[in-house]
Image: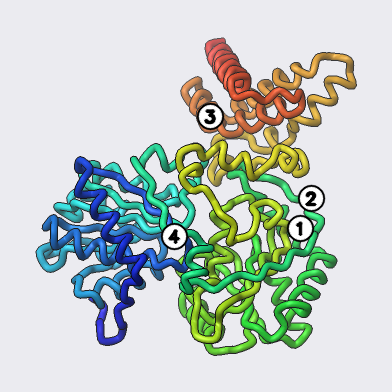
Amino acid sequence: MIDTDLYKAKELYPFQSETVAQILLEFRHNVHPFKLLYQLPTGGGKTVIFSAIAKQYIQEWQKRVLILTHRIELSIQTSRQLSAIGVPNKIINSGVKNIEDQQDCNCYIAMVETLNNRLQDNQQFIEEVGFVIVDEAHYNSFRKIFQYYQGSSILGVTATPLSSNKALPLKDHYQKLIHGESIKSLIELGYLADAETYNYDVNLHGLKIGNNGDFTVSSSDVVFSNYFMQEKLLFAYEEVALGTKTLIFNAGIETSIQVFELFKKHKYDVRHLDSTMGDKERKEILDWFKKTPNAVLTSVGILTTGFDEPTVKTIVINRATRSLTLYHQMIGRGSRKIPDKDSFQVIDLGNNVRRFGYWQDHVNWQDAFRFPDRFLESRISELEDLEFEVEFEFPKGYEKHLALDILNAFNMKENYYECLDAGVKGKLAVDNSMQNHFTAIIAQAQNVEEGLKCVEMLQEHINHRIKNYTRCISKSSENYLKYLVETYNRQLSQKIRMHFDD
């Protein structure tokens, strides 16, 4: 339990009270179990809202509440708020192997991976759960938990209702979206600080798009670590942010370390933070950042969620991203409002504003929820897909089953134009790709079962290659793409069966 004497409850603002009433009304009026998604911008107080909902649910429905998070900081933050408003609760961390007496409290907070491990051993690890609340619901990792709570109502909360996995949209799990106040409205109401955005046009040539749809870390490190980009970063900081508490977001550790060395060389008070650091070192760095007025903290990834430092005055996006969620998360770290802080600064060094618009711009989140593919395509243009080379990164462990050196040696676009130069049809590139996949599979597969399993493992890679082919021929309709992929899979599987039959 968290000592409430050390934490003062955050009281609900009027719009938050209205939201709590609106969400509870949805669960009263819809058939149980009901699955609802709620959107509210970063800084709008999602934790305060769903903590109040959890308290009311326990009182009204007399059932247990489970709150899922993906970061320990979010678990602790939630536990403190619940305790402060009089809701006894328990955090399920790695040290909790079993719960002796579940009558002691009706609210549990769990890290998704820890809880998944417990549920695999004991599906009744937490009994009589009537309501599941999912913080940062856009992360796809939460889905593995839902199978254990099919009879429970679910409330997902997120700032951006777009799944972290495009193939698994949120609309497939949640029945309805309610969106809260917009960023612009929260600024006008005085709840969020306004952003002054400074765009610096940069040359992103050399960036590659990975299979997750975003720019790869390796290519980002190459682009943003070069001398000219580092100099532009320093110039932008000295022109806009000099003397302000500054948080710099980078895509890779190599870039962040170089930023640290650059600022240190110029005598600025700077530290570097990334996910490889231990809890003790991380805490020490964040304490330093909190107490140091002109601090510059250069980081990688880990501060996009579960981090709240209202004294930040400047956000530097020293990377490019194709994720609207990440774009909002990074800028949102500067939006907390405190006395003497009505605005903050955003320095964009990745052409992100050109890609997504300004942070305060209106976003039709209902459209994003109901038609995610169309919504994203309207922001990430085909021109950009052509501008950047699309690179596929194989998941860890694939090298045990496939000859990755063979697969990486083949490039669909290059092969297509080689076919044309040789005076043969470009369609031959698809056959050459299939032969390449076949060669990489049989190089390590011992039998037909292993071979066909490899075909299943390669589905994303096959889609990646076929999509590149359709771009080459400027014929990328969804039906044609689907036809090519189905034909490719059928013929590849036949080749593997014939090989092992012989």
How many residues crowd around disc 3 within 10 Å: few (fewer than 14), some, or many (20 or more)?
Answer: many
Q: Which is more N-terminal, label 3 or label 2?
A: 2
The quadrant of the image that shows the N terminus is bottom left
CA gap between label 2 and label 1 equals 8 Å
Identify the residue at horizontal 49%, vertical 82% (top origin).
338
Q: What element carries label 2?
A: loop
- The label number, if any, that marks residue 398 in the structure image: none
- The label number, if any, that marks residue 206 in the structure image: 2
Quarter location, residue 347: bottom right
280 versus 368 height, above or below: below
Identify the residue at horizontal 63%, vertical 50% (top origin).
322
On the picture, is 209 further left or further right than 501?
right
Residue 147, image x, y percentages:
28, 42
Amino acid at pointer 4:
Glu
Amino acid at pointer 2:
Gly
Residue 232, image x, y percentages:
81, 69
Q: Do the residues labelled 1 and 4 touch (CB within 8 Å)?
A: no
Q: Which is more N-terminal, label 4 or label 1?
A: 4
Residue 410, image x, y percentages:
74, 32
472 versus 496 height, above or below: below
CA gap between label 4 and label 2 equals 39 Å
CA gap between label 4 and label 3 equals 47 Å
Please name which of the two marks, 4 or 3, marks the residue nearer to the observer. Answer: 4
Q: Which is more N-terminal, label 2 or label 4?
A: 4
Q: Do the residues labelled 4 and 2 touch (CB within 8 Å)?
A: no
Q: Are marks 3 and 1 in contact (CB under 8 Å)?
A: no
